Image (cartoon, grey):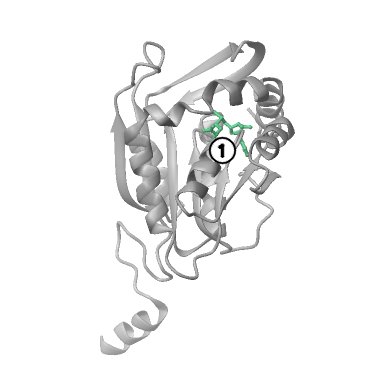
Amino acid sequence: MTEATYLHATRTAYDTVAADYDRLLRDALNAKPLDRAMLAAFSELVQAPGTKPVADLGCGPGRITAHLHSLGVNAFGIDLSSEMVAVARHTHPGLRFEEGSMSALDLEDETLGGIVAWYSTVHTPPELLPTVFAECHRVLVPGGHMLLAFKAGDERRHLDQAYGHELSLDVYWMPPDHVADLMSKAGLAMDAQMVREPDESEKPRQGQQAFFLAHKPAQGVVTGCLRLSETDEHSASRST
Ligand SMILES: C[S@@+](CC[C@H](N)C(=O)[O-])C[C@H]1O[C@@H](n2cnc3c(N)ncnc32)[C@H](O)[C@@H]1O
């Protein structure tokens, strides 16, 4: 699937369901203590003095943006669907929401202190995930953190109905090891991985749920292999 095709299909589907998605999921986080724990850890990490704003990419109706805000995070939301953005603005009038795609963010390099992508990469065809992670790496400040929530597994499902509406939408369950590898290749260093079992509201159709916390290393540092900074390389070559 091309990028343009998936973006159009996803935008159309979420424009259709926006109001009902908000109604059905607005309070869902209340019954998910492990998910809240990951959001709480992320919130602590992105609140050092002078930290830049945090973007909730694929924010939908803004429930995660609002939760982050309640934890003291300077968060704003970006979503592909204009209807989702309209619902988010209506429901959370004090917060900022913008239209945009996480595959081509309208943000300067190194302008975000943190990124949350909460079940918003689940519609991205796997071959396009490297583009999304490269964008996340580009806009994060060195030391900035990223929290990714996704469905663990290895399959694509096509939905023709969801949230009480007819639609056409692909959803991808991704192997956690593969996602970790893609994030690492994009230059994001893994800090923690939580894979939990489906809760009662997710059974029987859903499987395990994955939550990855990663960061963009300071310049010159790459995890998983040793890369010396430019200065170190020069001094290393001088000493040999
Ligand atoms: C399952 S909903 C999750 C919404 C929200 N994060 C939440 O947890 O309530 C997926 C959202 O991701 C958005 N989305 C999907 N692909 C996107 C992209 N490339 N850029 C921005 N938003 C995207 C959809 O429009 C939709 O609102």
Task: Report the residue that reaches farthest toward the bottom.
Answer: 238
Ligand 1: does it lie within 8 Å of the C-beta at label 1? no
- Measured as percent of width and height from the top left, residue 186 is found at 46, 52
Residue drawn 43% across and 36% down?
Answer: 149
88 lies above or below 160: below
Residue drawn 31% across and 89% down?
Answer: 238
Which quarter of the rendering shows the N terminus?
top right
The residue tagged 1 is: 128
8 lies above or below 184: above
Q: Residues within 10 Å of mark 1 (few under 14, many from 20)?
A: some
Secondary element under disc 1, as helix, strand or loop, is: helix
- Measured as percent of width and height from the top left, residue 10 is found at 65, 27
Q: Amino acid at mark 1?
A: Leu
- Measured as percent of width and height from the top left, residue 27 is found at 49, 28
Q: How many numbered marks does the figure carry?
A: 1
Which quarter of the rendering shows the C terminus?
bottom left
Residue drawn 41% across and 12% down?
Answer: 205
Residue 44 quadrant: bottom left
Given residues 98 and 144, the one toward you in this image is 98
Given residues 168 and 46, the one toward you in this image is 46
Task: Report the residue that reaches farthest toward the left.
Answer: 240
Residue drawn 36% across and 62% down?
Answer: 222
Left or right of 139 on screen, residue 149: left
- Measured as percent of width and height from the top left, residue 178 is found at 37, 37
Q: Quadrant of ligand 1?
A: top right
Can residue 151 be seen at all in this image of the molecule?
no
Left or right of 227 on screen, residue 62: right
Can residue 102 be seen at all in this image of the molecule?
yes
Given residues 110 and 124, the one toward you in this image is 110
